Image (cartoon, helix red, strand yellow):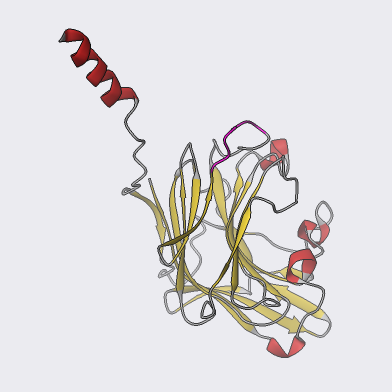
């Protein structure tokens, strides 16, 4: 009898499923302050030079502050063209808000047009020490205007090193219409991706080590709208500008 009680207690304490409900709201920005909250976000500016020209992807845009605004309680990242030059915006929560494990939820409306590449993604906080891809990358949502109706969810690890084989492309014909919710649930065992609460991809390598699973540390959030580049494509439809990537809110639960 005592042995059975001890066995039951062991199972309850050590073998119970991990709680991944993530119901405690630890970060929220609904962009209703009339300006970007610089206690949570930083602008990332320029063209990436001299260390990462083209932001590592041969992107065409220069990031500026004026291409990031808050309008009607929403974050608006605008892609514009002046002469032969392209401009857009990128912000990150690096060194201001970073988290390890949880659920991140972003409600956003996509821009349209060939050459546009909006993204919601995260990088490991140790990127300055370990570099990429050793730091790890979680791509919650990537969209490229050259292939309408498709959302990419991807993990970059030292094992993949730029090759997107830990990925899923989800086809949704109406994804460009209105707002949609992009959500990622992340714990010590797996990373799950959702679009409008529908599970579209689960990443959970059987062997978790530094090469396959650099996801056991804090990550920070990046929101940006790139133009052209290796993924966005070399062709840009110049008739589309200006275009807007609109984010209604960003929330993180643990």
In the image as oriented, which residue stretches furthest toward the left? Answer: 1
In this picture, is 91 found above or below 232?
Answer: above
Quadrant of the frame with the C terminus: top left
Residue at 43% from the left image edge and 79% from the top image edge: 72
Looking at the image, which is closer to me, 180 or 81?
180
Q: Main secondary structure of the magenta part?
A: loop
Q: Which x, y percent locates residue 112? A: 62, 82
In this orientation, which residue lies closer to the viewer: 240 or 164? 164
- The residue drawn where x is 20% and y is 14% is 4
Instruction: Locate the N terminus by quadrant.
Output: top left
Residue placed farthest to the top in the image?
Answer: 2
Residue 51 forms part of the magenta stretch: no
- Which residue is found at the position 75% from the left and 69% from the top? 62
- Highlighted range, magenta: 204-210
91 relative to 247 in the view: left or right: right
User: Looking at the image, can residue 59 be seen?
Assistant: no
Residue 56 higher or lower than 102, as above or below:
below
Residue 97 in percent (x, y) is at 50, 48
Q: Residue at x 48, y 61 (%)?
A: 37
- Is 206 within the magenta? yes
Q: Position of residue 19 (x, y in %)?
A: 34, 39
* Residue 180 in view in this figure: yes
Whether 81 is drawn above or below 32: the answer is below
Left or right: 82 as drawn, with respect to 242: right
Query: Residue 39, relative to residue 245: is it above or below?
Result: above
């Amino acid at each position: 009898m005592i042995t059975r009680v001890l066995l039951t207690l062991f199972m309850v304490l050590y073998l119970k499923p991990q709680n991944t409900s993530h119901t405690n709201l630890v970060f929220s920005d609904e962009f209703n302050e009339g300006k970007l909250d610089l206690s949570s976000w930083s602008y990332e500016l320029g063209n990436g030079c001299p260390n990462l020209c083209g932001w590592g992807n041969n992107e065409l845009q220069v990031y500026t502050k004026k291409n990031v605004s808050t309008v009607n309680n929403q974050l608006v990242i605008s892609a514009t063209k002046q002469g032969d030059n392209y401009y857009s915006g990128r912000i990150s929560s690096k060194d201001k808000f970073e988290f390890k494990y949880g659920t991140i939820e972003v409600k956003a409306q996509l821009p349209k047009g060939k050459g546009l590449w909006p993204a919601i993604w995260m990088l490991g906080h140790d990127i300055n020490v370990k570099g990429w891809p050793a730091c790890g990358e979680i791509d919650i949502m990537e969209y490229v205007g050259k292939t309408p109706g498709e959302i990419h969810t991807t993990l970059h690890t030292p094992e993949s090193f730029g090759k997107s084989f830990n990925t899923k492309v989800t086809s949704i014909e109406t994804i460009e219409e209105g707002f949609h919710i992009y959500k990622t649930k992340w714990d010590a065992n797996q990373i799950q991706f959702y679009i409008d609460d529908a599970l579209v991809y689960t990443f959970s390598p059987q062997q978790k080590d530094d090469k396959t699973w650099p996801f056991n540390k804090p990550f920070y959030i990046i929101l940006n709208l790139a133009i052209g580049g290796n993924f966005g494509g070399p062709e840009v439809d110049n008739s589309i500008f200006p275009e807007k990537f609109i984010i209604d809110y960003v929330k993180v639960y643990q």
